[in-house]
Amino acid sequence: MTDKTQQNNVTKRSVAGLNQNENNIFTNRPQPNSDEKEKVLVQQLLETEEKLRATEKDIQSTKKNIKQIETSQTWKWSKPIRNTKHLFRKMNRREQLVEQERFIKALQEKLNKTEKELYEAKQKLRNYKFETETLHEEQITRYIRELRDRGELISFLNEMIANKEKLDQNYVTALTYIARLYMNENEDYRNWIYNKVFTALTNEETPEFMMRPGLQENNPVPLKHVSSFRGSLNRRMRQKQLAQQPLPEWLLDDKQKAYKFVEQLGIRTPWVADTTYKLEDIPAREGIVIKPADGAGSRGVYLVKTIDHIVDLKRSKQLTSWTELLESMQKDLHTNWVERDEWLMEELILEDPETAVPARDVKFYTFYGRVGIILEIQRYPEAKYCWWTETGERIHVGKYREQVFKGKGVTPEEMVMVEELSKHIPAPFVRIDFLRSHHGLVFGEFTPKPGNYDEFNKKTDQLLGDYYIEAENRLMNDLLAGKVFEPFKAFSKM
């Protein structure tokens, strides 16, 4: 058998193999479990890539043989008689060349199709992993970065949105129908099924017929799943967009005005300079805090104990000169950590004046006359956090789990003071922040929208969601009863 015949047979086998396996890339074979299903997908990818390599090799080999024929002496010497079609084919195996060219075309078509199948297989595996596996956040973020680096992120985004909408709708349809099957069954059975389905549906996905038993007088179905602090604050942000006037809690977001409001109620505040400063105009003095006029959190906040002992609160870093302080503040502006060159200057509150220990933060999540949870923060030498219930129990809420410490908590008198303060604010929620001085709590600021309020675990989110709904009810009842909120009215006219 000649080399050409062998090559021809190889080419035919390759095409035949492609034809045989053409419809086997995504066959629906029953899988015992998700691990084996993924293994099947991976195997299909490997098999497809092997076919690609074999096909490409066949094409290159066939092209090489054609080149050898065309450059051979026989081909050159036959030039005078190639006008005779019959002799040309007989002497130079033109039939083989024509057939091989036909095979190359077929191989190229199969190659293109296989490449498309390979791409689809990769897409299927990629979507399958997101739909069936529990992935760590690090795995997801790393994969997303890789997609962006490969220029595939936007197509992936579109696919994920479409897939999520499709899957969500399928799940909601199935779960709703399961609940509907038990709508007229024994009440205990129905309630058990409803409570199970509630755990998987969002508030917006829950059908009316499942909410109806929650209104019955005897043995009502708990509707706790509809309570969500995240959902309530998200809705409040939309209210803020639609409101013709600023919402009450957002009027208090101005720190300087907020001090005047709480001073009416006899609550201690730090002394505050009556003006804002440009960076270059801040006077060098000791015992002060410098903070952005419109900042949040600890970015851009500096504790000036002495001119050569300054604490950069966010970076937990000590600065040793006023020049170093100004350079750091300039960096805050340059990197947009601080948006505007407007700075407040106020009294430095210390927890222990002798050791110059900075005051810790005590942040009360208040719901119109009731404290929900309390966050205690030690800022220096490193940030640590402790969460408390209104009854003084330490809890985990899903945030800052790796940076906890055993805080000191608050006194019953402090709880009463904070709850009374929140009753003077006609809003269902506002966080009220204090500093823990050696003489007790000193008011810091009001926070209408705490940062990362979406990071609470489900239990805490639902608990605070209940607090929010109850606060709305109390506020509405007080307004209907004619409550005037005199201190707040006086403040709002300032």
Image: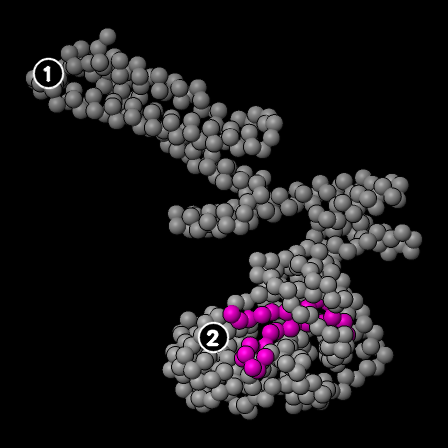
* Residue sitting at x 57%, y 40%: 133
Please identify, in this view, whether the residue under mark 1 or under mark 2 is nearer the observer. Answer: 2
Left or right, residue 33 beside residue 486:
left
Whether residue 485 sits left or right of residue 76 in the image: it is right
Looking at the rendered structure, the kind of residue marked 1 is Thr
- Residue 449 sits inside the magenta stretch: no
> How many labels were placed on the picture?
2
Q: Which quadrant would residue 36 be assigned to in this image?
A: top right
Mark linked to residue 74: 1
Q: Is residue 183 visible?
A: no
- Relative depth, front residue between 363 and 391: 391
Q: Position of residue 373 (x, y in %)?
A: 70, 66
In the rendered image, residue 356, in percent from the top left (x then y), is placed at 54, 79
Question: Which region of the structure is painted magenta?
Answer: 352-381
Q: In this rendering, would 425 be left or right of 75?
A: right
Please name whichever residue, 383 or 15, is drawn nearer the observer in this view of the structure: 383
Quadrant holding the C terminus: bottom right
**Residue 3 position (above or below residue 362):** above
The numbered mark at residue 312 is 2
Q: Quadrant of residue 91?
A: top left
Q: Extreme right residue here?
A: 218
Q: Residues within 10 Å of mark 1 (few under 14, many from 20)?
A: few
Decide: few, some or many residues near mark 2? Use Cα within 10 Å; few <14, some 14-19, many ≥20. many
The picture places residue 393, in percent across and down from the top left corner, at 73, 63
- Residue drawn at x 48%, y 24% as measured from the top left: 24
Q: At label 2, which amino acid type do we have?
A: Asp
Give above or below for 35 relative to 72. below
